[in-house]
Amino acid sequence: MIGRRPWMMGLGARLLTVGAGGAALADAVQAAPAGGNASRGTPAKPSGAALTLSRAPLVFPRDHGSHPETQVEWWYVTGVLRPAGTGAGRSRPAQDLAEPPAYGFQLTFFRVRRELDRPLDSRFAPSQIMLAHVAVTDLARRRMHHDQHLLRQGFANAFTDETDTRVRLGDWWLVRSPGPQGLSRYRLAFRSQPANVALSLTLDAPLPPLLQGREGWSQKGPQPEQASRYVSEPQLSGQGQLAVDGQTPQAVQAQCWLDHEWSQAYLGSGSDDSSSRAVGWDWLGLNLLDGSALMLFQMRRRDGSTLWTGGTWRSATGGQQNLEGQLLFEPLAYWSSPTSLSRYPVQWRVRTPKGVFRIEAMLETQEVDARRTTGFLYWEGVVRVLDDAGTLRGWGYLEMTGYAGRVPL
């Protein structure tokens, strides 16, 4: 949804000076392909009308691309990885998906619009900032590797494309193109010497993009402007190469989820004490074993109460149901972070019209320290999905923000 996905509007003047973050990179991932039609200019300062999020019908592939007129935007890929095995094809048999994954990962790109007191007609003007987070959770060794980048947009190593998903920040990139039957095919890659990881994947979508909420309009609270345009690509599958801790790259098979969101306002206006403002969220992207998918979220007030809930269920054949206002999140177990001293719910029971689901973190220590880019910490990690009887239903990712301090969005 969001993670990684968004807080950057409150980062202020410290974004004027930005650097690349790690330098030398592992050799396991190829360099990104050049992006065409990149959005490299300095958009004019928007008028009050332009600050209103457009409700126009989404058109693809254009709306897979960037929306530089909006305040914040992110492309977010999470997934689970398993050894590919000898002679494995592009997709594993359905029964293999019940096997516990060996790794989880996230790759997130953010584009943040920052208004200047004196707009400059120059590529050097930092009116568009790009940030990115990567993380790989090694479930066997019970540790998480993560890294972060922050750069001004507008150069060959930091760009987004307005015509389709072509996003790059240094040697981290994500590209979409038409795949089999005209459905989306994504290629992604990142490599990080500080985190000692490298990953490259090619992923195919089984169905057209999933428009979250009402035709891609996802309400996040009671204020009219408290919303995003929100598109997902669940049940992505494919193969690639993973290298961790300097080991020889290994072939992996992936089951993934992609989100693309853009917004003018997310948490709402007013003070943090306002009953109509959120200070954080809990989000789930779940790929179920039967081929269906669930996106579930709740926005939380400062006192911990629920401000808003939303979500979508999609069947394996493409039927879908909007779940806005029909969810109940119940925390069942907590983990206390030694870094932030925050207490995160790492097990949940979520009651939905499609059933009751129990969500369990595969590893409790999946807190991401993103203070060097977004200025705060959050929890993001791979989870297993059970039904209320304890039967495995699938795998996914859980993101929790606002537990380790205010989210400046």
Image (spheres, rainbow, N blue to C red):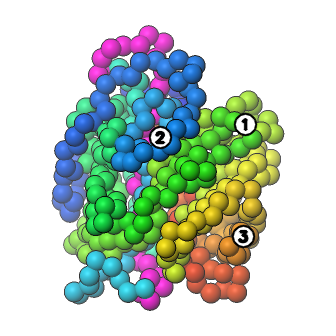
Query: Considering only order in the chain, which callout, 1 or 2, is on the residue closer to the N terminus?
Result: 2
Q: Nearer the viewer, residue 199 or 319?
A: 319
Q: Amino acid at mark 1?
A: Gln
In the rendered view, does 38 fall on the left or right side of 255?
Answer: left
In the rendered view, does 253 fall on the left or right side of 16?
Answer: left
- How many residues crowd around disc 3 within 10 Å: few (fewer than 14), some, or many (20 or more)? few
Residue 250 on the magenta segment:
no
Q: Which mark is residue 223?
A: 1
Q: Amino acid at mark 3?
A: Pro
Is there a contact, CB below 8 Å, between mark 2 and mark 1? no
Q: Nearer the viewer, mark 2 or mark 1?
A: 1
Q: Which residues are magenta?
A: 95-124
- Residue located beneath label 3 in the image: 353
Q: Residue at x 51, y 80 (%)?
A: 289
Q: Distance between the Cα atoms at labels 3 and 2?
A: 30 Å
In the rendered view, does 117 fall on the left or right side of 253?
Answer: right
Observer able to see residue 79: no
Q: Quadrant of residue 315?
A: bottom right
- Residue located beneath label 2 in the image: 73
Q: Position of residue 238 (x, y in %)?
A: 32, 71
Q: Which mark is residue 328?
A: none
Q: Residue at x 28, y 57 (%)?
A: 178
Q: Position of residue 100 (x, y in %)?
A: 47, 82
Q: Position of residue 35 (x, y in %)?
A: 23, 43
Residue 120 on the magenta segment:
yes
306 vs 20: above or below:
below
